[in-house]
Amino acid sequence: MQVEHTVSDYDEDLRFLTQKISAMGGQAERMVERAIDALIRSDHKLAETVVADDIVLDNGQRDIDEKAVLVIVKRQPMAQDLREIIGAIRISADLERIGDLGKNIAKRVSVVTEYRQPVSFYRGLQALTDLALTQLKFVLDAYSTRSISQIEVVRDRDDQTDAKYTSLFRELLTYMMEDPRNITPCTHLLFCAKNLERIGDHATNIAETVYYISTGEQMPIERPKDDTSHEVTITKG
Amino acid sequence: MTDFQFHMQNRIDELKASLENLSAIRLAMALPDPVIVFSGQFEAVFQNKPAVEAFGSVQVGRDIRITFRSPEMVNLLDSVVSDGTKISTNLIERVPLERFFWVTATPIDERVGLFVLLFRDQTEAHRIDRMRSDFIANASHELRTPLASISGFIETLRGPARNDPRSQHQFLDIMQEQTGRMSRLVADLLALSRVEMKKDISPDAQVELGAILDIVVESLSKLAGNLNVDITKLYRDAKYFVAGDRDELVQVFQNLIENALNYGSSGKRVEVGITGSGGRHKTAIEVWVQDYGPGIAKEHLPRITERFYRANTEKEHKGTGLGLSIVKHILARHHAAMVVDSESGKGARFTVTFPSKPV
């Protein structure tokens, strides 16, 4: 919970940061959702909107940085307030990256959908998107309510995302081996999948920041795994 | 003024007075849709019970732009406060559960400086839309199989069987059976999208499983011949009666045996059997389909009844991946269970268990 200060402008500043982060989060969620929608429905118009929307997140991050520096200089915050501000800087950087990854997916729409691709190409991607978005929504909800009671769940979810990504990696390799004409779309889809997996990682970062804001401590280190797709090989026959 | 008129006027005044005393909170509490009241500084002021259920409880004074952070909602909130005019938008949540709301923001009264958000849940309408597109996917899948079989028979009738009246007669019978099934299927699928709502109601007609399997095996005999697979019927003429829908059960076993033929063709034989008794000593009836093909790898087993899931992506099979999910759906309606036993390299056995009827 945020603490009331005698100077109410100060509260106003902190509220500004929280609200701005929240809006950036909403924007990032929507961008990822739309980028994948555009990909699955071959919607080039929508993809262009996503690419254009990225500027909102870039500006958001800049606003937050400026405001945060200003607050630090003017108020010399301590303890929880300082953590709020540092947290805001960190989270906005993660959200801005998520926006970039979403934009990157949207940019690939025109190449992937140049020719009609079988639906099976997208199915795994959709499942991966749902996982990544659930993770993102969960951490943003945790940020807005400052509730860290279930924050560790995010890490388990990240394991699921990694597992899904690895299986998708394998699947896409198979398509490429079946028919060389699949190589172009599937390579792009591999990058899309990687982007989604990265979005999951950023969500985990945000979870750690939220934990830090609320407790003043770093979340215990135990991130044993990452994705195992680097060891996936497929042999024919 | 008559007594009566006087009385009426009194009553009207009373009613008007009671309306004046009606608290806005009580009114909002009585509404079935989520309602949230907020201030010009976006502070949450009040939410009714449906709003708590839908969006979790929002602390009074908290910025509601943090609860509703989607760009559309932030725009809506900003513009209702700055313009002071009623405005609406869609609120769409994709995860964890898909939800759709039509949201209207309205300034309540300039003097109090409060605004109200009204949510209309449209998830159900979207679900029906989704069902419609699923229906099309199902219909095209299920019509393809009988069509392929008919077109195969036509080919034979024009070619090898041109001068063989006996086969012609037999083929025409099968073709008629198939076309009949197709038209019933179309009707059923149309009905299915309607009855999906009441899927708890189980079918109550009495059907005989042996006869159903006979029909299915017969209709697949050509496919089996092409694939060079023997179908062995391992059941007696005992009457295996269960409560069920004939066409749906035909579809269940058609899908299962066809899968066994397509995926297990390397095993050269497929066995179909019924155990249990539907006669006087009523026990659960089990129908099983066993193939001796490559089997299904363990990691795929939990997922094979998922829509569109296909364990083997390398081989080209004609299925669309909907077969087993349709089976699962129909069996659920019959309170029947399906168990799959398989090991890589040792074939697969699909067992459908019908509950013993209450006597």
Image (tube, coloured by chain):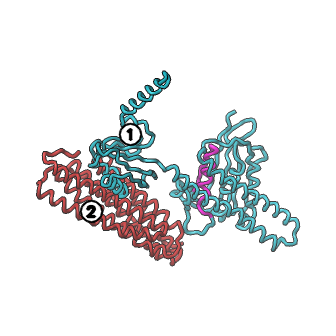
Tell me which residue sits at (76%, 57%) in the image. B180
Tell me which residue sits at (71%, 53%) in the image. B250
Where A126 falls versus B192 (above or below)?
below
Horizontal and vertical percent for residue A185? 47, 74
Marking on residue A60? 2
Q: Secondary structure at mark 2?
A: helix
Between residue A57 and residue A9, name the one nearer to us: A9
Label 2, residues with CA under 10 Å away: few <14, some 14-19, many ≥20: many
Q: What stretch of residues is rendered in magenta? A: B319-342
- Tell me if residue B333 is in the magenta stretch: yes
* A46 left or right of A10 in image: right
Between residue A213 and residue B288, name the one nearer to us: A213
Residue B304, by quadrant, is bottom right
Is the same chain shared between marks 1 and 2? no
* A158 left or right of B307 in image: left
Tell me which residue sits at (52%, 66%) in the image. A120
User: Of the residues shown, which amino acid type is indicated by label 2?
Assistant: Gly
Is the Cβ of the residue at disc 1 closer than 8 Å to that at disc 2? Answer: no
Between residue B305 and residue B177, name the one nearer to us: B177
Q: Secondary structure at mark 1?
A: loop
Look at the image and tell me in which quarter the N terminus of chain A lies. Answer: top left
- The residue that mark 1 highlights is B48
- Residue B218 seen in the current view: no
* Subunit of label 1: B
Where B329 falls versus B18 (above or below)?
below
User: Of the residues shown, which amino acid type is indicated by label 1?
Assistant: Asn
Chain in cyan (letter): B
Chain in red (letter): A
Label 1, residues with CA under 10 Å away: few <14, some 14-19, many ≥20: many
